[in-house]
Image: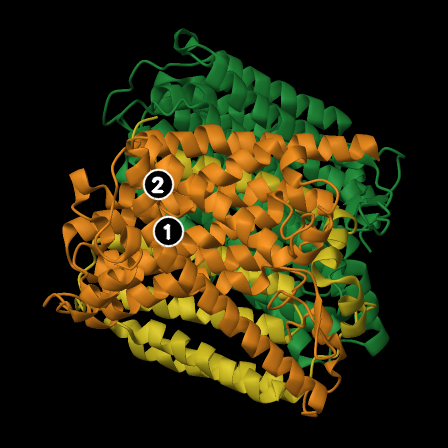
Amino acid sequence: MLAYLFYIVAAITVTTAVYLIFEKNPVFGALYLIQTMVSLAVLYILLEAQFVAAVQIIVYAGAIMVLFLFVIMLLNLDIGEETKNALPYQRIPAILMGIALFTIICIVIRSKLLQGKQDQYTTAFVQGVGNTKLIGNLLFTEYLLPFEITSILLFVAAIGAIMLAKRKL
Amino acid sequence: MTNVSIMTFNILSILPILILSGFGMIVLLVDVLSSRRLGEKNLLAYISLIGIILAAIFARSPAGTTLFSFNESFAIDNYSLFFNFIFLLSTGLTILISHSYIKREEINHGEYYALILFSTIGMMLMAAGADLLNIFIGLEVMSISIYILTGFKRSKLISNEASLKYFLLGAFATGFLLYGISLVYGSTGAINLKQIASFIASKGGISDPVLLMGMGLIIIGLGFKVASVPFHAWVPDVYEGAPTAITAFMSVGPKAAGFAAFLRILITAFGSAHDEWQKIIYILAILTMTTGNVIAIAQTNIKRMLAYSSIAHAGYLLIALVSANDMGVSGTLFYMLAYTFMNIGAFAIVIVLSRKGDEFIQINDYAGLGFKHPLLALAMTLFMFSMAGVPPTAGFVGKFYIFSAAIKSGYIGLAVIGVINSVISVYYYLRITVIMYMKEPTREFAPLTISPLIVAAIAISVIGTLHLGIFPSKVMEIAQQATLMLK
Amino acid sequence: MLRSKNAADWGNVSEMNKEFLVYLVIVCVKILLVFGVVQLMVISMIWLERKIMAHMQVRLGPMRVGPHGLLQPIADGIKLLFKEDIIPEKASKLLFVLAPAMAMVPAMLTFAVIPFGDAVKILGYKVDLVITDVNIGFLYIFGVSSLGIYGIVMAGWASNNKYSLLGGIRSSAQMISYELTLGLSLIGVVMMTESLSLVDVVNAQAKLWNIILQPIGFFIYFTSAIAEVNRCPFDLPEAESELVAGYHTEYSSMKFAMFFMAEYANMITVSAIAVTFFLGGWQGPFLPPVVWFLLKLSGCLFFFIWIRSTFPRLRYDQLMHFGWKFLLPLSLFNILITGLVIVIKG
């Protein structure tokens, strides 16, 4: 039953992602992207990663995509405006390379299942402790340094947004 | 409440990072709180310099030996300390050359210094990171700061374009790197470099295509950061558009950080699989050197020429990476230090000669400099000789170590190509000298606005270039100690 | 699977055994019940709001239909049903139709994790009076409520009307800004409870309500909740004097009614969260838990109406400054203090 659910949600995810690329109207494109994000969150739930799923929805579907829509609406991009292909000679090589890359990835993925080191974090263990708690514990013990440095990263990004975008400094 | 056992970590090990971030924030606060009448903002440059000096003082292994902290994810060894020194040096020199420049260009905001300090934090994390997560976050902190600094001349279109271009391509490269990291994690179950190494060793080399692909993607991501061909397309435009002082900074700091991470990942984690990646890097090295040098010949803009020359230098450093022996690693360290001096020195002179609203960056603008400002021309000549690899300069010694490392590992063909490339490069480096001394000035030199700080920067660069060229043994000894810790 | 605590003993999902069926039935009944009650409350809220505001402004309000105008909502509903449903010619049809539903759904979804009573025994089965108790309830609420913006944004854009668009953009900016403080104001409670499950949050308040321990948190929560649901004095997205009717200018008939109901449903949702996090949820002496819950909920809703009839509307820049420069630092300060107290108390 869960396997079927996975296939259904995966199909939705891929379909909306494809629609996103081929959609000419940017607003609809953004809405497809939102659907992709939400479907990804469902996939995370199927993988027992509830915390990641919730964060996925809050951050991507709830915050980032709203800003996307916001910008698209403010710029009032026209529907289906045909732009001239600026790089006509790159089109065919790009498609060929894309197919090649896709094939390689398929071959690589098919070659064998990922066989990483089995960790102590099995599904049963995660369910016992709780997803959120476990992530919290790891962030504040094992991955303390990257976690703290991330605050500098966000700080820098905030400075950058103000520096580059503010009308008058 | 379950008990959370905080693992032991040595706060001293990240003291330089803490100092720099603290000073970055102090700079911002002082900028906000100081009144507008203090407008000159000299204070901010001095505060940043104090921060850098303090960080340099505390940047040492607390116990005097290799120290792993934060669950073995952060390594304080001679290798990272040497790189930290390079980063702090390049940051310090950048601040020295920036001070008058940003005032002249009217981009004198406190954020400028803060972002430079923050990007240094990123570099330090990259050099000391012993797991892929730390290296990645360090890379992001560094890159994002520099994307912003590139676009700091907000009113100039060319600066905006450079920033956007760098950001988009950089984000793409980061995507490759991250995908690579995730594949490596998926196939080995570890992000710690040592654990990856032991996993590969236990399997007797890389036979897993997923892992191989992960490694390849990591090489692409880092190859972008060190500006190797074919991931170099951003370099000329970004170097030209960025504020000149930032161009100097990003041709040195991020490149050094990129190589620091490159060496540590490839040698520590994928050391037992060097047959696989050496082939890739071999080709990259030849492409990078040749492309950089050949295109540099055709440049008429000095910033673009230095951009292509920086690509070419990345090629030489890749030779050291291919050889993957102790000598190659110490050669990289030495070369990077030498490159810091000579490159920032050259950019400092470009800055001194430029004026507000007139960048003065056509190579022909330099005609007659030798008669008008003999000292500047002499310094420029020295830097150009050093980049070309003429003895007795630092550039010569660095190239000598790198090529001999290649020969020692049996890559004689690569060394020969490197030497041929050096010969090509002599043409365009010496052309500047020739123009400076042999041609009549085509236009007038404006009265120079020389601040004591930029003079200090040029002096330090000159002394460094000469010292490393004439007495390399002491520094080389330190560099050799650094490599012992890597494996 | 997002497995709730009482569903953990399903065992193998493919075995559609009796217990699973019972569980399914109970959940469905609970969903229908909650949905019905909320809709009923929405309808009565419309009447109550008009009446209460009228009395506060020393007038009578609707009096004609039924005793004291009690049947007014039904009359309104019938009127709206029979009105012509207009879709503007240049509107984006699909989004125009979808938007009211998108506004309504997230408001209703939030109720899935709000506990409205203690566990009771019905026909030998233990039934928790919460649709599902997930261990990420807190995050779930914010995930779902952050989706609520889309309805308004889509409506504003799809109408192809500048007032609608401005209203939509205003409201999304406002909601993004205040969502931050909304989330941060609850962090204090979560820190004290050490759980993200709303059932645990309620259980932890058996002795003392969180409003006493977290007065600043409650203040911030309620203020940003008002802004989040676009109520007066933060109802700028539909400021009549500037924007006609904001994002729903072009809407008529039942689609308009849907937006109206979504606003009230949202109000009930944020009030229910306030009750759960700060006012002890269903906890209370003498009366049955469900009654307590409804009583507290009504109190909160009354407060909303009271504020609406008391305060004048803010200017847009005032609203933004208030959110970013006052509420946000205050909520961070609240978290800091909470953390310090927890550490000191050990």
**According to the colouring, which chain is yellow?**
A
Residue C20 is situated, as x and y percent measured from the top left of the image, at: 68, 85
* Of labels 2 and 1, the one closer to you: 1
Identify which amino acid the numbered label 2 is placed on. Answer: Gly
Left or right side of B211 for A120: right
Q: Chain of mark 1?
A: B
The residue lying toward the viewer, choosing from B4 and C2, is C2
* B373 vs B411: above or below: above
Q: Quadrant of residue C94?
A: bottom left
Q: Left or right? Give the position of B97 relative to B63.
A: left
Q: Colour of chain C?
A: orange
The residue at the point 31 percent across, 56 percent down is C70
| Label 2 to label 1: alpha-carbon separation | 10 Å
Q: How is the image coloured?
A: by chain
Based on the displayed image, in which of its 4 quarters is residue B266 positioned? bottom right
Residue C133 falls in image quadrant? bottom right
Numbered tag placed on residue B241 in the rendering: 2
- Colour of chain B as rendered: green
The residue at 31%/13% (across/down) is B447
Residues under numbered marks 2 and 1 in contact, where contact means CB atoms less than 8 Å apart: yes
Q: Secondary structure at mark 1?
A: helix
- On the question of residue B296 being in view, the answer is no
Q: Residue B216's spot in the image, x, y percent?
A: 60, 69
Horizontally, is C146 left or right of B276 in the view?
left
Residue type pointed to by label 1: Lys
In this view, B171 is above or below B144: below
Task: Looking at the picture, tell me which residue is in the foreground, A86 or B11.
Answer: B11
Question: Mark 1 highlights which residue?
Answer: B165
Q: Position of residue C222 (x, y in %)?
A: 49, 39
